[in-house]
Amino acid sequence: MSNKLVYVDEVPFWMTPEGRFEAAELRNGQVVERIMLRTSLGLRSLGSACSIQD
């Protein structure tokens, strides 16, 4: 299961598989999707990529 983009009062948040809400980063008006790697030590950020909104 992956993160889902949700809007709360017109502000974008990522809803994680664990049910947490994390603020979504905007770059040039586009939501930036974070790439996470699950390791034995927990989740680690690999970087970010701009997502395309339809």
Image: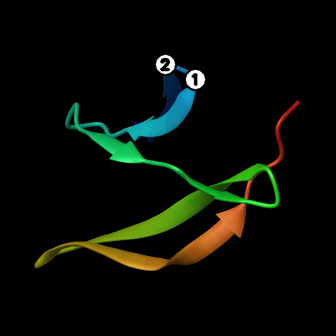
Point 82% across, 60% down: residue: 28
Dot 2 and dot 1 residues touching (CB under 8 Å): yes
Q: Amino acid at mark 1?
A: Glu
Element assignment for label 2 = loop
Element assignment for label 1 = loop
Which labelled disc corresponds to residue 9?
A: 2
Point 52% across, 63% down: residue: 34
State how far apart marks 2 and 1 are (Cα): 4 Å
Seen from this angle, which residue lies furthest top?
Answer: 9
Image coordinates of residue 33 in percent, x first then y, are: 60, 57
Instruction: Decide which of 54, 29 is in the foreground and name it.
Output: 29
Point 45% across, 38% down: residue: 13
Q: Which residue is under mark 1?
A: 10
11 left or right of 28?
left
Name above or below for residue 12 compared with residue 47. Answer: above
33 left or right of 20?
right
Q: Amino acid at mark 2?
A: Asp
Name above or below for residue 47 compared with residue 27. Answer: below
Name above or below for residue 8 compared with residue 46. Answer: above
Image coordinates of residue 36 in percent, x first then y, are: 41, 67
Name above or below for residue 20 compared with residue 38. Answer: above
